[in-house]
Image (spheres, grey):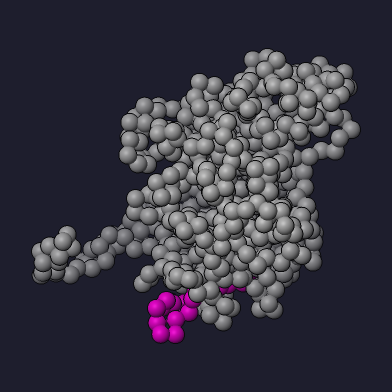
Amino acid sequence: MITMALACALAQAAAPALKVPYGRLCNSSGPLVAGDGFVISTDHGSVQRHALSSEAKVSTAVAWDGADLLPKPQDRKIYTLSAAGTIPFQWAELPIDLRTVLDADGQGEQRVAYLRGDQHLELAGAFRKRASVLGEIVHSVPLIVGAPPASAGEGHEAFRAQFKGRASAVYAGANDGMLHAFGALDGAELFAYVPRTLIPALPALSDPAAPARTTMDGSAGQADALVGGHWRTVLVSGMGMGARGVFALDITDPLAFADGLRALWEFSDKDDPAIGHVQQAPQIARIKGAWFALVPSAINSAQADGALFLLGLDKPASQSWSAGVNYHRIDTSGADATLPNALSKPALVTAADGSVTLAYAGDLQGRLWRFDLAARTAQLLFTARDDNGRTQPIFHAPVVVFAPGGGYLVLFATGKLIEPADLLPASFLPQSVYAIHDRLEVPAQPVQSRAQLVRRTLSGKDSARIDYFAPDAKRGWFADFPLAHDDGERTTDSPVIVNGNVIVDTVSPGAGACESAASRMYVLDALSGTLVEALNIDKAPTAPFLAPLLVEVSAATGVPDPSGAAMASRTFAVVRPGSPAGSKPATFTLHFPARRMGWREVVNWQELHDAAIK
């Protein structure tokens, strides 16, 4: 169903709030992302570049640390958004309403200087002492953006040619209230952006007596899109637990951010109370010829039911948000208002022309939804429950593959690790990985229970394939994580699809919570759920709750047989955040058919060709 009236959201009771901590669970290391021959790591007030070898070993040498390279306070390029547009984040440039927020104690000008990096009042004890001028990067996953990718639509080739030499930049949100852009090659800060929505939270950053809190720990996503009739590279980021909402920036030329479209807009709970604290990276997509940012309602929304927002990229910063005009909200329904809930990041289904038609997302009450983005509707496909009928939370995005015979298989895993209660033995409930067949019926025919699915084990003993269109066809498969009951095993991130296999990473907090946390990775055939490989349990006490990097280290194709068939292989290294630099990562190899599988003479090929083009 779709609800446009804000009164509906205000009238609906909100679900109990999730208690996401200021710091990382277990004080673990930060996220890790890979570029071309390097990795970017974040850890407690630093963002660093390390070389990555062909064997996926992370160098012990630090190529640069962005925290050590920040310009002098007066030279930094820091911006925010006002009613008049993008402005420098400097006291003399701020409008009266923003000055009032920052100047409640008469120290507004000094506070702005402090936030820009001035340490005079910090050293004198008047303002909070910082371990680093660069705020701690907590939950924000760094985003690396290089030259524009292959063609994204009409006119994009010219845009791509113009910016093919664009140097890579690293974007990350930090607890200084800013999204930072660093040069990926040298670590220089290119610019920083302070979301206007976050400014009321900034005075606490300088207050020595104020409790620590997160201010800009959302992750960013990006894509090339048409904005105002021109191709631009657009970044969209949530503000994490600092504030409810998201913002969009034009990062076409990060070296000249002030000369471009700069900040496009911000969208917060003041525009629609159903938006929550967005930590996962938003997505950008073309829907029915128009470009939108796709954002789930996420954590601690003002309504129990989840919602998927479609925010128009073309909206001028000076124009008010209007439901049904420059944004759309697709609501789910039927949530239990007595239980926590949050809609997760969706998986998108792309049509042949590059537009997005469908999205799939789960929520913390175990429900998997299909969103028809053209019709603006949401339909329930399945509710994840264990053998005792207890719902299993879906916190991470699913992945989607084609199902044999038609429709899609939607694959996802359950479990969450976002608040301290998730570490307690009381949370050690059965969690699972699922594949649900969406036959694309209208209206959708939900999978009613596990009885309609094929049960798989993670022992490697399953072998039978699934006929999804047999008269008594099952609607998918599932497998329970073997360590869930004893050690709290659950998923850490979205599944990954590689050569027809789904890769699921899990973590087991264990009886000692952080101290005995362990990780495991399963490789399953996506269509049948049969186990291909399970990596041994790895003790990872420093970073047990972050997804690893999968780095391809080798590929090979075997000798073809007389029919032309051959087997190929790809070997991947598993690089886990927090692992000692220079250590040898675990690896696994996938084998799959390559080249021609057989020969068949098509005697009427011309007839078939002529019929196909009519």
Residue drawn at 78 percent across, 25 percent down: 100
437 vs 61, left or right, is left
Residue 36 in the image: x percent, y percent? 47, 37
**Count the marks: how many?**
0
Residue 569 sits inside the magenta stretch: no
> Which residue is the extreme one toward the bottom?
472
Q: Is residue 275 above or below residue 400?
A: above
Quadrant location, the N terminus: bottom right
**438 with respect to 508 (left or right):** left
| 44 and 229: which is toward the camera | 229
Whether residue 514 can be seen here = no
Q: Nearer the viewer, residue 563 or 306?
A: 306
The percent position of residue 591, horizontal first and vertical second, equals 40, 62
Nearer to us in this view, 359 or 593: 359
**On the rendered structure, is 421 left or right of 377?**
right
Q: Is residue 321 visible?
A: yes
Magenta: main secondary structure equals loop
Q: In the image, what residue occupies the spot 73% across and 26% down?
A: 98
Residue 470 in the magenta stretch? The answer is yes
Q: Quadrant of residue 408?
A: bottom left
77 up-or-down from 436: above or below: above
Residue located at (45% from left, 35% from top): 227
Q: Which residues are magenta?
A: 463-481
Residue 147 sits above or below residue 93 on the image: below
Which residue is depicted at the point 49% across and 62% down? 502
Quadrant holding the C terminus:
bottom left
Q: Nearer the viewer, residue 211 or 287?
A: 287
Give the image location of residue 67, x and y in percent: 67, 27
Give the x, y percent position of residue 4: 59, 53
